[in-house]
Image (tube, rainbow, N blue to C red):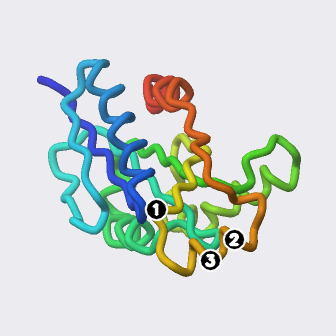
Amino acid sequence: MVKRVLVIYASRTGTTAEVAAEIGKAWAARGWAVDVRPAKDDPPLADYQAVVIGSAIRMGRWLTEAVDYVRRHASALGRLPVAVFTVHALNTGDDPPSRAYREAYLDELRPLRQPRVEAFFPGQIAPARLCLFERLTLRVDQSARPKDLRDWGKIQGWAHTSLA
């Protein structure tokens, strides 16, 4: 019997959706049947042997639809191995303040479901994909200039080893 993994994501600009798709490809390369679905579709957990959940960060928090998904399915998630990933464009350093800010991204999630594995991936700032408010913020915040910080090798490597 082929094992099945569900990769769930919440994304505003598509960057996290692209990361989720890459994670799904890595799991498929390991021989798993993979479904990659947005959290807002509320996919059921029946018939899966593992779950990977990811979210973009907005205002220092996971997106609401991802947290709400975990809240709604906390009981079922408690019976499955769960890995989580966060895609963010700030706090990418290895210094203690950056690490502390990254860890805090999951503060709302951890009481609902303690993941077995966590990963934090730098994302992409693409002004064309942002709303007007976010584009205006980019004009003020010089550190948040357009850039793609995604490390596809690191993402694939994590997917190959997460929940192994």
Q: Residue at x 60, y 61 (%)?
A: 106
Closer to the N terminus: mark 2 or mark 1? 1
Q: Position of residue 12 (x, y in %)?
A: 42, 65
Closer to the camera in the image, 50 or 29: 29
Mark pair 3, 2: CA separation: 5 Å
Q: Residue furthest right?
A: 96
Q: Is residue 112 toward the left or the right of residue 89 in the image?
A: left
> Which amino acid type corresponds to the residue marked 3 in the rendered image?
Leu
Mark pair 2, 1: CA separation: 13 Å
Q: Residue at x 86, y 55 (%)?
A: 97
Label 3 Cα neighbours within 10 Å, binned few <14 / some 14-19 / many ≥20: few
Label 1 Cα neighbours within 10 Å, binned few <14 / some 14-19 / many ≥20: few
> Which amino acid type corresponds to the residue marked 2 in the rendered image?
Arg
Closer to the camera in the image, 3 or 129: 129
> Which amino acid type corresponds to the residue marked 1 in the rendered image?
Ala
Q: Residue at x 38, y 44 (%)?
A: 18
Asked if the residue under mark 2 is in contact with the one under mark 3, i.e. CB atoms within 8 Å, the reply is yes
Residue under label 2: 139
Vertical order, 94 against 59 (above or below): above
Residue under label 3: 136
